[in-house]
């Protein structure tokens, strides 16, 4: 698997006054994509923090808005692991309208791996071994 998909129907609360997805909510969809991707591989974000003592704060995020998503649209959030660095993970995202197939947004986010003291650490071998087969080539 080189990506993870999940579908979500846009609620009224996720839109702005113009009836389109509020721009910051795309970052929320990205976060859910990361979380569910890891969960699909058998690793919960919560376990990284509570058991492994590592965190993946966002260091950089980018969204490119291509077409509006609207209230009650069914969208697909596709998440890729685009890079495994020594001490960071970069994800890439595509959001499409399920009913029309139209690409409505793309983006990426970069996450350093830090310990409880917020000091950068290398990606643990267990996590690297889990993610490597699912990283874009």
Image (cartoon, grey):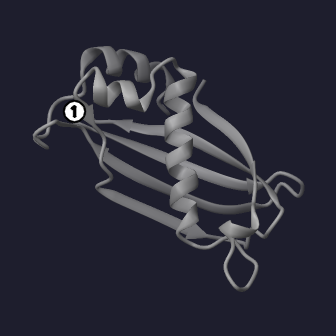
Of residue 42 and residue 88, the one placed in the foreground of this image is 42
The secondary structure type at the circle numbered 1 is loop
Image quadrant in which the N terminus is located = top right
| Residue 12 in the figure: left or right of residue 62 | right
Residue drawn 66% across the image and 67% down it: 14
| Residue 137 in the figure: left or right of residue 11 | left
Q: Residues within 10 Å of mark 1 (few under 14, many from 20)?
A: few
Give coordinates of residue 66: x percent, y percent: 66, 71
Q: Residue furthest right?
A: 99
Residue 45: which quarter of the image?
top left
Q: Residue furthest bottom?
A: 17
Of residue 85 and residue 4, the one placed in the foreground of this image is 4
Residue drawn 69% across the image and 73% down it: 15
Residue 13: which quarter of the image?
bottom right
When the figure is inspected, residue 65 is found, relative to residue 1, above or below; the finding is below
**Would you name the residue on which mark 1 appears?**
86
When the figure is inspected, residue 135 is found, relative to residue 61, above or below; the finding is above
When the figure is inspected, residue 117 is found, relative to residue 13, above or below; the finding is above
Give coordinates of residue 82: x percent, y percent: 45, 40
Of residue 56 and residue 92, the one placed in the foreground of this image is 56
Residue drawn 35% across the image and 50% down it: 110
Total residue callouts: 1
| Residue 77 in the figure: left or right of residue 97 | left
Give coordinates of residue 104: x percent, y percent: 70, 64
């Amino acid at each position: 698997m080189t990506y993870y998909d999940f579908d979500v129907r846009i609620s009224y609360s996720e839109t702005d006054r113009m009836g389109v997805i509020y721009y910051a909510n795309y970052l929320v969809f990205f976060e859910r994509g990361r979380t569910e991707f890891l969960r699909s591989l058998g690793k919960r974000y919560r376990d990284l923090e509570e058991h492994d003592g590592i965190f993946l704060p966002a260091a950089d995020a980018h969204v490119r808005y291509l077409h509006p998503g609207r209230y009650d649209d069914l969208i697909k959030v596709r998440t890729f692991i685009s890079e495994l660095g020594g001490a960071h993970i970069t994800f890439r995202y595509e959001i499409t309208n399920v009913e029309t197939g139209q690409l409505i947004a793309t983006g990426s986010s970069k996450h350093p791996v830090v310990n409880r003291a917020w000091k950068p650490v290398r990606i643990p071998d267990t996590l690297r071994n889990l993610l490597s087969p699912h990283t874009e080539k």
